[in-house]
Amino acid sequence: MKMIVAIIQPHRLEEVKEALYAAEVNLITVSEVLGHGRQGGNTEVYRGNRENGNLLRKIRLEIGVNEDYVEKTIEAIIRGARTGDVGDGKIFVYDLAECVRIRTGERGGEAIG
Ligand SMILES: Nc1ncnc2c1ncn2[C@@H]1O[C@H](COP(=O)(O)OP(=O)(O)OP(=O)(O)O)[C@@H](O)[C@H]1O
Ligand SMILES: [Mg+2]
């Protein structure tokens, strides 16, 4: 199992959600976060998302998947999030040791999807 964490532009969230649902990825956590990449928050086109000095408003997605969903999840995020401009975001993939569905006690691959 992997945990896929993606930081995307807020204005691409709807497109990313649609691309994920089209790829049958339906379980997701979404957070509002602040950050900057290698431009230090200075050169991104201003879209009303500057929050705190050089920190920009971004959306963080967390998606836990079985191995056979890793690539299609990454591809769906890229399809929804890419504009070609700086600040489009980044995808991080972590090894995921365990997942437990609290309601049933299921674990691992049974619990994650
Ligand atoms: N190495 C990193 N560690 C932690 N967060 C990061 C890292 N790189 C990017 N981020 C987060 O992702 C957001 C989007 O990054 P961004 O797309 O600007 O990356 P970049 O490396 O600057 O690439 P680009 O040149 O395409 O802008 C940042 O605002 C920050 O929140
Ligand atoms: Mg950047």
Image (tube, grey):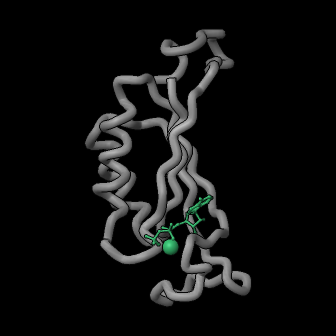
**Residue 107, position as x, y percentages in the image:** 60, 11
The number of callouts visible is 0
The picture places residue 83, in percent across and down from the top left corner, at 31, 71
> From the viewer's perspective, is 34 left or right of 23?
right
Residue 70, picture quadrant: top left
Q: For residue 15, what is the image quadrant?
A: bottom left
Between residues 96 and 29, which one lies in front from this camera angle? 96
- Residue drawn at x 33%, y 65% as measured from the top left: 82
Q: Is residue 93 left or right of residue 36?
A: left
Q: Nearer the viewer, residue 100 or 6?
A: 6
Q: Residue at x 73, y 82 (%)?
A: 52
* Whether residue 22 is situated above or below residue 60 in the rendered picture: above
Residue at the (54%, 35%) spot, across then down: 3
Residue for point 63% across, 62% down: 32
Q: Residue furthest front?
A: 38
Residue 4, horizontal then vertical, whole percent? 51, 40
Question: Against 92, is 26 above or below?
Answer: above
Q: Examine the rendered structure and indicate whether residue 20 appears above or below residue 94.
A: below
